[in-house]
Image: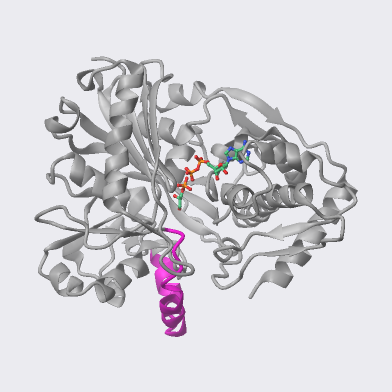
Amino acid sequence: MSGYILAIDQGTTSSRAIVFDGDMRIAGVGQKEFTQFYPQSGWVEHDPEEIWETVVWSVKQALKDAGVEASAISGIGITNQRETVVVWERESGKPVHNAIVWQDRRTSSYCDKLKHQDLEETFTAKTGLLLDPYFSGTKLSWMLSDVEGARARAERGELCFGTVDSFLIWRLTGGKSFVTDATNASRTLMFNIGTQEWDAELLQILEIPAEMLPEVKDCAADFGITDKSLFGAEIPILGVAGDQQAATIGQACFEPGMLKSTYGTGCFALLNTGEDMVRSENRLLTTVAYRMDGKVTYALEGSIFIAGAAVQWLRDGIKVIKKAEQSGDLAAEADPTQDVYLVPAFTGLGAPHWDADARAAIYGMTRNTGPAEFARAALEAVCYQTRDLLEAMHKDWKGSGADTVLRVDGGMVASDWTMQRLADILDAPVDRPTILETTALGAAWLAGQRAGVWPKQKDFAKAWALDTEFKPKMDAETRDAKLKGWRDAVRRTLS
Ligand SMILES: Nc1ncnc2c1ncn2[C@@H]1O[C@H](COP(=O)(O)OP(=O)(O)O)[C@@H](O)[C@H]1O
Ligand SMILES: O=P(O)(O)OC[C@H](O)CO
């Protein structure tokens, strides 16, 4: 069998497919952006058909780029934007509504209502999550209430719910497999992360019929076989994980205490806590890092909604840069005597504040403030927020090893300026690996080791290679003053 593995990385702004060779090196890539719909303030939707088309296109392109036939692929690993809700007809596979994206805040008042009924603790105890519109459950509930006839159809078993992985597998297998994995299930607000089952009580509260939920499998499992008509050969789907969990795997954070942070549209830091379901006292999430051979490894997660999205705002919103790559150089030109802070609560604030109603603000502007200070403030905001998450993690995690370095990945880590500033603000080293497509690599590894063509966990971890270690250089006085300024700015922004 060849060692070629195909990873499908279905992200928030684009679909990507990567063919890896037997030495786990990238052999071919296909990538396509798709449309973001903003039907109302705070609402974000995707067209599932467009997601599907961009995935199929990307896979074909990646195979072409690698010069490899589908028959040479030993297995597929799928990773995806998490929490995003798709509902489709069981008969036809047709979606009944646009996908409601993880960033969408439309269920904010529904979450408040559940909180006022004192239900947050019930959800947190079972799912490790909080009552925030971010997660799938209240979004699915909204779809069943607001799409005409949907709840009755779901009760009759005519509709399927899935996160994006389930929808893609359904389509890839010609409707033969209706499955998900434990990491994606753990983000829905309906899955009990202790018992590893859909939770009847939570489904009842959210008024969701169990008939519409997929079977939950390990991250490395037999998820189905692709329909031959799609790529010219049947390929087994052998690995699935939500994108942040796939990045944790791709970064080989397999030991308790190991920590990664991914800087894409948002930023998500995951700390491996091993078999311990650590309950946060600092508003972090308890979630499934991965489930292999029926054994669950848990993580503490800090989720920040805006990271690279702040760079997009510099580019598309206030137009101070033309390309994301320019943000670091512009920030480096900023006047060091100006203390300008951006609190990027464009869609509320995630961990550790969970303030859905806060909105972004800039503080400390003078007549001399210009594009360079905006760029620095946007990039520094990501660093400060990471520091807030890591401080919360250190308080929650009593095990050893949480002082270890942070492994980083995602589009934003290409910026040396940002990574150096991150190390300075954290006062800790930041490690950037040679392979920045860590998310895709994690999904590919799940499939590759399952197919028996890639190394098992220990040898895979040994293959992790450092590109650059950013060491802190900022003096303590400067850092403390900056952190104080940031905390003041956040306090003034909270709703
Ligand atoms: N050199 C750079 N400096 C700063 N930000 C960057 C740079 N390159 C890309 N980005 C940001 O990274 C994000 C894309 O990262 P990616 O991991 O592909 O995200 P996603 O998976 O969420 O679509 C974009 O928001 C972009 O603005
Ligand atoms: O698409 P990304 O990389 O921004 O990741 C989105 C997360 O999975 C949302 O929880």
Q: Is residue 217 visible?
A: no
- Type of secondary structure dominating the magenta stretch: helix
Q: How many marks?
A: 0
Q: Residue at x 9, y 55 (%)?
A: 91
Provide residue 478's location: percent of width, then percent of height.
87, 49
Q: Residue at x 54, y 56 (%)?
A: 305
> Would you say 266 lies left or right of 425 here?
left
Extreme bottom residue here?
A: 117
Provide residue 399's location: percent of width, then percent of height.
59, 47
Provide residue 58's location: percent of width, then percent of height.
33, 33
> Would you say 316 lies left or right of 371 here?
left
**Quadrant assignment, res 451:** top left
Q: Is residue 234 visible?
A: yes
**Quadrant assignment, res 44:** bottom left
Residue 109 lies within the magenta run? yes
**Quadrant assignment, res 257:** top right
Q: Residue at x 44, y 21 (%)?
A: 459
> Would you say 489 lies left or right of 297 here?
right
> Would you say 5 lies left or right of 439 here?
left
The C terminus: image quadrant: bottom right
Eyeballing the image, is 180 above or below 486? above
The N terminus: image quadrant: top left
Q: Which residues are magenta?
A: 102-126
Front residue of 3/153: it is 153
Eyeballing the image, is 105 above or below 12? below
Front residue of 361/221: it is 361
Image quadrant, ligand 1: top right
Residue 331 lies within the magenta run? no
Provide residue 443's location: percent of width, then percent of height.
37, 35
